[in-house]
């Protein structure tokens, strides 16, 4: 099992708000616990991973 702590940058495509979160990669999927933007956008984001 591969699991690593990573830093994620999320930018909302609706309002441009940016978030920096810590997440973890689990079997190729990134989990951050991030639910939604302040503007209620839940699925239109640019996600950037910083190892
Ligand atoms: Zn937003």
Image: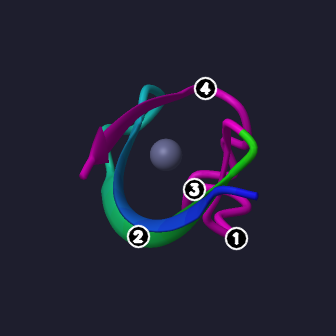
Give the CA distance from mark 3 to mark 2. 13 Å
Whole-percent x and y of residue 50?
A: 23, 49
Whole-percent x and y of residue 32?
A: 61, 65
| Residue at which label 4 appears | 44
- For the residues labelled 4 and 1, say whether their Cβ atoms are less than 8 Å apart: no
x 73%, y 62%: residue: 35
Q: Is mark 1 within 8 Å of ligand 1?
A: no
| Residue at which label 3 appears | 37
Point out the tag, 3 or 2, that comes first from the N-terminus: 2
Whole-percent x and y of residue 12?
A: 43, 38
| Residue at which label 2 appears | 21
Give the CA distance from mark 4 to mark 1. 16 Å
- For the residues labelled 3 and 1, say whether their Cβ atoms are less than 8 Å apart: no
Quadrant hosting residue 37? bottom right
Q: Secondary structure at mark 1?
A: loop
Give the CA distance from mark 2 to mark 1. 9 Å
Residue 48, relative to residue 40: is it above or below?
Answer: above
Quadrant hosting residue 38? bottom right
Main SS of residues in magenta: loop
Image quadrant where one finds the N terminus: bottom right
Nearer-the-camera pick, 18 or 49: 49
User: Which region is colored magenta?
Assistant: 28-51
Q: In the image, is 30 to the left or to the right of 45?
A: right
């Amino acid at each position: 099992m591969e699991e690593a702590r990573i830093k994620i940058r999320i930018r909302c495509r609706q309002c441009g708000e940016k978030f920096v979160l810590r997440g973890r990669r689990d079997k190729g999927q990134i989990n951050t616990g991030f639910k939604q933007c302040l503007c209620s956008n839940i699925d239109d984001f640019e996600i950037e991973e910083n190892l």
